[in-house]
Amino acid sequence: MSKFNGEAGAGLVFLILYLCVFLWLLFAYSTHIIKWRSRWSMLFFHVVVRLASQACGIGFAVLGFANTNMFLAFLILGAEGYFTLVLCAFRFIISWHEHNLPGGVSWLEPRRDTKIDPRKRTQRILAFLFLGPFALLIYHDNLMAAFHLLLILANTAIIIGGSYLANANLADFDSSDTQRRLRISRISRTAGQSVFLGCNAALLFVLLLTARNDRRTRGRVHPTLVVLLIAWIPLIVRGTYGVLQSADFELSYYNPNNYGSNGFTAHYTLVEYLMGVTTEWLACVLLSCTYFTSKNDPPKPDITPQREEKVVELEQKT
């Protein structure tokens, strides 16, 4: 029988919390405090995905296994939410570079508004598509393209691994087919989550390097960088939990012992919302707080392709 339980209550709490962030972003957009074509667009997209994920989570908690499609949507949207949040963090540090570095160019990524020959753009896309991170040997001025590629591949591996195990017969857990699906799914999902965790570690390196250079230049660390460093803490906790959840079947969504008659057990609900959902929401709120620390940042300077190349070369040397 469908009913409103503790899992649905937890889902509703975070639905309201994400709705608060969503309404603040809408207000900021409508009053032109922030721009659509900015780092905030990625954060807005993340919040929309998390709202949809929480709605599906509440639906599954109320309906139980009467609607398995709701459960699968909850899992997929949850993975997409973390994927977009990691991208958000990188976009925020790139935005800080563009507003605060002398030439207005991030050494992670060339400016989007510079004119790039369509043929060269196509060559870059194909290079990163077929060579992966090794394309950096050719296009070392666009590190973010490599991060994008790695995160997309990792996200695909997580979704494929989850979908592959979703077709397993968990009622016959010891069957050879179920064990094979479990093994392949675990490898795929753990590999994807490990890449996410590695990108989070790389994010810390970028933040620390940027903070060190800023302190050398100005004698202090910009408040936005401090907030981003704090936001990295819940991000790395979420990433670590993702790896553990993929590698350890006791923490897996697909472990029958984590379910009762109406959905997740109380213990699993607590672990999932504490380690998975709360950490993402905290990181999201901290990223939102950078609005207040960056209000007095200078605007992005106009830049030509020739000047961009010189600035990026200078930043890489320092």
Image (tube, helix red, strand yellow):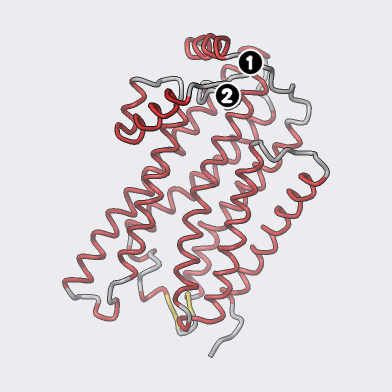
Q: Which residue is drawn at 53% across and 23% down?
A: 110
> Mark 2 belongs to which amino acid?
Arg
Residue 36 percent coordinates (x, y) = 69, 40
Disc 1 from disc 2: Cα separation: 8 Å
Residue 158 percent coordinates (x, y) = 37, 54
Q: Report the disc number at residue 303.
A: 1
Residue contact between numbered discs 1 and 2, judged by CB atoms under 8 Å = yes
Residue 239 percent coordinates (x, y) = 45, 48
Write down the residue under mark 2: 111
Residue 94 percent coordinates (x, y) = 58, 29
- In the displayed structure, 132 sits above or below 183; it is above
The one nearer the camera, 299 or 180, is 299
Left/right placement of residue 93 relative to residue 220 reads left
> Could you say which quadrant of the image residue 207 lies in?
top right
> Mark 1 belongs to which amino acid?
Ile
- Local secondary structure at mark 1: loop
